[in-house]
Amino acid sequence: MTTMRKSSFLLTALTILMSISTAISSHSPLQNFLTCFSHNSHASKVIYTPNNTSFLTILNKKMYNKKFQTPTTPKPLAIIAAKDASHVQATIKCAKSNNIQIRIRSGGHDYEGYSYVSDVSFVIIDMFNINSVDINLQEETAWVDSGATLGAGGHFSGGGYGNMMRKYGLSVDNIIDAIIVDANSNILDRKSMGEDLFWAIRGGGGASFGVILSWKLKLVQVPSQLTVFNVKRSKKVVQLNFIGQFLGTTERLLSLIKESFPELNLKNSDCFSMPWINTTLFWYDKPFGTPLEEVLVEGPPSIYFKSKSDYVKNPIPKVVIESLWKKMIEGETMYMDWNPYGGRMKEILPSQTPFPHRAGNLFKIQYFNRWIDGSPESIGRHVNFSRLIQKFMTPYVSSSPREAFLNYRDADIGANIPSNITKFDIARTYGRSYFKANFERLVSVKTKVDPDDFFRYEQSIPTKTY
Ligand SMILES: Cc1cc2nc3c(=O)[nH]c(=O)nc-3n(C[C@H](O)[C@H](O)[C@H](O)COP(=O)(O)OP(=O)(O)OC[C@H]3O[C@@H](n4cnc5c(N)ncnc54)[C@H](O)[C@@H]3O)c2cc1C
Ligand SMILES: *[C@@H]1O[C@H](CO)[C@@H](O)[C@H](O)[C@H]1NC(C)=O
Ligand SMILES: *[C@@H]1O[C@H](CO)[C@@H](O)[C@H](O)[C@H]1NC(C)=O
Ligand SMILES: *[C@@H]1O[C@H](CO)[C@@H](O)[C@H](O)[C@H]1NC(C)=O
Ligand SMILES: *[C@@H]1O[C@H](CO)[C@@H](O)[C@H](O)[C@H]1NC(C)=O
Ligand SMILES: *[C@@H]1O[C@H](CO)[C@@H](O)[C@H](O)[C@H]1NC(C)=O
């Protein structure tokens, strides 16, 4: 009797289990995700699926590289336009329990679209609604949310720089606190995350470690008037722009340039004096007198582009530069940024933050190829040209590792290496390029804070057991 009851009970339990598992398997991971999300957060109107008419509008809203805006580009299962931390927490929890990967997007400037494109099933956590900036003038600090106009999430976590880097270092050199949601959906600040994780997210790429909601910055003093210049010099069909921003007066700048770079022949009439806020419009080629509110307007529309970077340690011979111009003319659509290092940049130790490119660099090159025709043939040809130019520059730039700037993400780094090499070796290839010796510490932090590798993407930091 007892045995009978037991086995019939077992049978019933089994039947129930079976029917539950059948019920689960009949729902798609997305539907399970949506159900889970609705149980874990008071969300209305934050989730867009392909059923929502505005799905594509929202998807394309922050997508700087048109290469990833084609009908055949893989799309996310859903976009979660988080309005507060609870939406981020619920997304992490529900994506995890349904084995769906996430991609995190703030400004959508990623050169390879890694914040909104993937070959795996994924949802996007979109930060554009979390965008306030809170300034404390007494303390000279500011809390800046990841979705603030510039798209601060990726810019800061990737070691972003601006025009004052030779005076004050990178954005990450001026971050004093951060709020992050980790793989267990915990909300942490600097104190609760600890110094290792706080180190890692200041240049190691946030998306390997968590979702950063907000950054606390130490503000820097600028004089009431700055001096800027944008001097154009032409060589046949090549145009060179010498651009400068100086935290001081025109007189002082002219005497400094006369001393250290007389070849430029900088004139008083080349220089413009203005408050810092006006320089932001100047660098966007806005006419004088443009209202300052213009800085709040979204940047230029997206374009097709492929970019690469290099670090230069020794002067490039003149003949090589001549050949480089010739190649650029053949390619027709490429421009380069040569971004001088030195100053404050060389005083900061390479291990201070994950961004390792400090002393010893004369300048960084960005090879920026952009074009209008979006056909696959055109995309292939332009990407090939970028590779060709970079190959040509091999003898004149950093090697072992050939360094690259994380914020100029390049999918070619670590691609096309022999198939007998492990996934970790591939990660080490891009890891060493972006982080040099800091890669190992990033792997340790990653292994500690996200051992299951929930926060992964195409060029993420691997765990030790990857
Ligand atoms: C027109 C243009 C101008 C640029 N100018 C400069 C410049 O002057 N200086 C400079 O340093 N860089 C510059 N960049 C590069 C830019 O800093 C990087 O592309 C940066 O990664 C952009 O961050 P984002 O949030 O806009 O991009 P996204 O594409 O949203 O994100 C980039 C990466 O960061 C991750 N990420 C985004 N938000 C978060 C978050 N909240 N938490 C965790 N991870 C997150 C993403 O998942 C992705 O891996 C420029 C890029 C463009 C397209
Ligand atoms: C998307 O559509 C669903 C179902 O119609 C709706 O509940 C949800 O609010 C919509 N999302 C947004 C952001 O409007
Ligand atoms: C989208 O709409 C289709 C057709 O109405 C429906 O079958 C499907 O369940 C919907 N998907 C989501 C995620 O709401
Ligand atoms: C700065 O910009 C404001 C707004 O356009 C303008 O009124 C002011 O004259 C500008 N100052 C300088 C020095 O360009
Ligand atoms: C790009 O280069 C590859 C390898 O050299 C070549 O096979 C391919 O045809 C090129 N593509 C275009 C569009 O030129
Ligand atoms: C991978 O293969 C290449 C040649 O096919 C060989 O030279 C190399 O040693 C191999 N590497 C490893 C890690 O097995």
Image: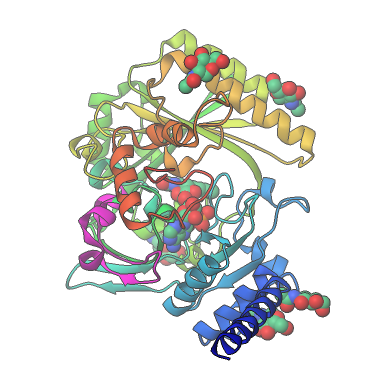
Q: Is residue 237 visible?
A: no
Query: Which percent across, then down, holds residue 363?
Result: 36, 29
Q: Which quadrant does the C terminus fall into?
A: top left
Task: Give left or right: position of 443 versus 305.
Answer: left
Q: Residue at 60% across / 73% down in the picture?
A: 33
Front residue of 352 and 324: 352
Vertical side of 117 occupied by 432: above or below: above
Residue 443, image quadrant: top left
Confirm whether residue 30 shows in the render: yes
Judge by depth and name the residue closer to the eye, 462 or 194: 462
- The correct choice, above or below, for 12 with respect to 129 in the image is below
Q: How many numbered markers are drawn?
A: 0
Q: Is residue 151 left or right of residue 192?
A: right
Q: Which residues are magenta?
A: 170-199
Q: Residue 182 magenta-drawn?
A: yes
Residue at 50% from the left image edge and 84% from the top image edge: 41
Could you tell whether 257 is left or right of 204 in the image? Answer: left
- Which residue corresponds to the image point at 50% horizontal and 83% vertical from the top-left? 40
